[in-house]
Image (cartoon, rainbow, N blue to C red):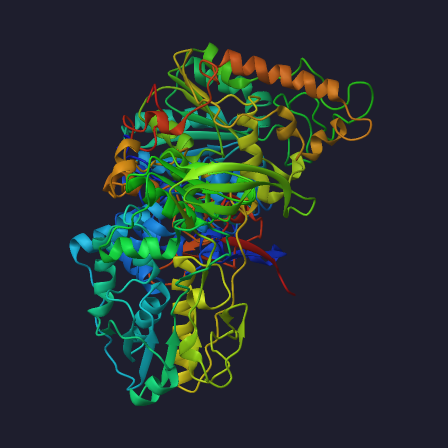
Amino acid sequence: MEKPFAITLDVGSSLANKTGSWRTERAEYVHRIPPCADACPAGENVQQWLYRAEDGGYEAAWRTIMEENPLPAVMGRVCYHPCETACNRTHLDAAVGINSVERFLGDAAIELGWTVPEPAHHSGKRVLVVGAGPSGLSAAYHLRRAGHEVTIRDAGPVAGGMMRFGIPQYRLPRDVLDADVRRIVDMGVELELNHHVGNVLEEKSSGGFDAVFLAVGAGIGRRAYIPAGDSARILDAVSVLHSMETGERPLLGRRVAVYGGGNTAMDVARTAKRLGATDAVVVYRRTRDRMPAHDVEVEEALEEGVLMKWLSTVKHADPGTLLLERMELDSTGFPQPTGEFEELEADSLILALGQEADLALLDGVPGIAVEDGVVRVDATMMTGHPGIFAGGDMVPAERTVTVGVGHGKKAARHIDAWLRGATYERPPRHQLVTFDMLNPWYYADAPASVRPQLDVARRRSTFDEVVGGLDSRTALFEARRCLSCGNCFACDNCYGVCPDNAVRKVQPGEPYGYAIDLDFCKGCGMCAAECPAGAIEMLPETV
Amino acid sequence: MPFQPVKFYQTGSFVAGNRLLDPEERTVQADAGRSNTLTSGHRACQGCGEALGARYALDAAMRATQNRLIAANATGCLEVFSTPYPETSWQLPWMHSLFGNAPAVATGIAAALRVKGRADVRVVGQAGDGGTVDIGLGCLSGMFERNDDVLFICYDNEAYMNTGVQRSGATPPAARTATTAAVGSEPGNVFGTGKFLPLIAMAHEIPYVATATIADLHDIEYKVERAMSMHGARYLHLLVTCPLGWGCESSQSIEVARLATQCGLFPVFEAEHGSVIASTKIRRRVSVEEYLRPQKRFAHLFGPGGRPDVIAHLQRIADQRIARFGLIEGGHLDNDGAHAETNGADGRHAGAR
């Protein structure tokens, strides 16, 4: 080719110059585990379903929840949301209202009739689930999805377990619970109610079951010996809450004392208020900060006029009055008696001192180990008896609905593997995302949405639901407050900020939306530094 | 139900793209079909702010002119790292002549196009701070006063980086360079010297003068697009980090530029016909110390034998600029959500936009 004067070479592109050879560090896209998912007892991939909800993909979001948790509408009401406590957004303004978005999705599913199809394949294996509480329902759901025949047997007249007989209606309306349960039953899960399982081995062999999951809960109120005069009215909280469901409203009187400091104590005190008690007094031997009840519950109880008597024990119960002794915390935080007494007027005393599991169905089953009133299970949720698994409140754990659901899922995975003669390998856990891994500059300011609450006046007199839901606009806003910790959310920042144009967009469907062109990546680290979500890691280049 | 604005997009328009925004509201840089005017394989250092700033600005200008754009480039890093003979990284017609004459070359290109009747083809001139504020100032001032139809972009990295970090008229006080050693009672570049070219450009009362940094992509693209919507002499002063000359990590280029704006030392504003019409408000205010500390060119101000008095002096300068350019409105920082109802993406660029 004829070249201009003094030109001897063709024009070349700098693309021939592979500057990737300068690199000592390489950028890599990673998935890290966000604190919400890390904290979720049910193992929900919170960030992932929020991601789907962010662009209005509510059904996809709901189905992502359903991968892990079959009770979204229930969860969105009764979960104590450790995800929100862990949320990295607390370092910016306030946690993402994960629980309220979950409830919105759960309610949308009920309203729009989203269902989960029956499994396409059948394993031919039969599993017996004992107990239709959160743990049992969760296990049944996951086992059914894995293609097994599942039968749930429950001694009660309706399904739900503690969700029905422990959690009052003002926290969990029964139509919501029924809808979430019905969806599981509609997948072909057999539900046999009013069926008390007396001996688990007998039922296992007579029913031809290949494995059993026990989730009978802890439904017996713990009693404490309290010296009492004749006709002093002493009840236990579990029975009170139970009778609220079975039709006969308990007679509690005008002045009700509740003994204990857990969530059940709050529930029963708030129930007493709604039944017409003028005074509902919670008597607890320690201080508020040591109460096992969750803060929200205590707050709501106080708002409704429940009174608290800290550092007090009940020494004697007489009709109409209780004798309380004042306590003092010693240096270890344990309450010690002071010898100072006072009287409290009370028509009834309700004991909310914890609950125990009825383990009679395990009598005579070889290999079962019971410690502190609960059944010991191994890391696969299996008891000492092969093929019998257990979870929920009857095994050692925190006793919440969400923990129960998590147990059910975990047990289902192991039961499924066990039935196939395999072992379930948990996928390796990604690195946890801490706030310092994020680049918070990029997130727009946004205060949390507040769920409307029922007027206090109405809360004291009715069993209407206290906490309302978000509407779709507010739910969308709330979902978009998610920082997407540790996971790419396609913001194009890495693609934009690379001075070497070494980030490529790849086809949807690839594990990540972008790829690094190592021919030209000089390893400056700008993409990693400017990734809002901390989803890019710089790794030393090996020679 | 408490009222919540619906127009909230998680990261709003702070990030390059954001799948929640309409494609028109995303940046040119988020577009897989962007021009990549400065393509891969160039020999700029790792994390070069100038390479990034040049692609940001020229890609936006390419979109604004439907790819009918010619660039005249002064001598400097940008020229050296992009065009070692016979390679070029430029994917637009690009011309280099001398260190000091880029504005005149651009003027000549514009004149030739006028003669040829090619009103559709537009011209940018570009240079570093040395080529703009020192060596090329005469040509640039001439280009301004003749109101030639050129957008001139200065990539300001505050020293002659290409030749080994010598002081320029844009080097900030107290900064160490090869010619302003960090020794003596007044270490680094002396206070009271240097010039801020945007104000000189404004004194020419040309149609458009703006400042921006590589820390705000949407802002750069907005300003380039606005400049290209006008005719006559226009000037864009872009602060670009130099990891080598400033002594910061290559990964920190954008962060350091961001800190320059958030401490008030680098005011981001736009002016038309000699008057400031809008300034970008500080969103997360920081002290100058936070901006200076990551840069080794200011290392002598810190540690034992450090100079808190010098830092305080720089802080006073920052405070004056905040007041002068109205970087904090009514004592309030920029509140992203406040204008969410009235503006496209989280209410940024409210006011003049």
- Give the answer, above or below, for where B269 lies relative to A392: above
- Give the answer, above or below, for where A118 lies relative to A59: below
Q: Where, quadrant-wise, is the C terminus of chain A in this rendering?
A: bottom right
Q: Where, quadrant-wise, is the N terminus of chain A in this rendering?
A: bottom left
Residue at 51% of width from left, 64% of height from top? A429
Total numbered circles: 0
Residue A276, given in percent of the width and then of the height, sits at 28, 39
> Could you tell whether A10 is left or right of A287 in the image?
left
**Between B194 and A113, the one nearer to me in the picture:** A113
Residue B325, given in percent of the width and then of the height, sits at 49, 14
**Between A480 and A175, the one nearer to me in the picture:** A175
- Give the answer, above or below, for where A129 lies relative to B280: below
What residue occupies the far front of the structure in this picture? A230
**Between A405 and B240, the one nearer to me in the picture:** A405
**Between B55 and B333, the one nearer to me in the picture:** B333
- Give the answer, above or below, for where B69 lies relative to A245: above
Residue B296, given in percent of the width and then of the height, sits at 70, 35
Residue at 27% of width from left, 25% of height from top? B342
Residue A251, given in percent of the width and then of the height, sits at 29, 48
Residue at 52% of width from left, 33% of height from top? B97
> Could you tell whether A77 is left or right of A375 in the image?
left
Work out whether residue B95 can be spotted.
Answer: yes
Work out whether residue A61 can be spotted.
Answer: no
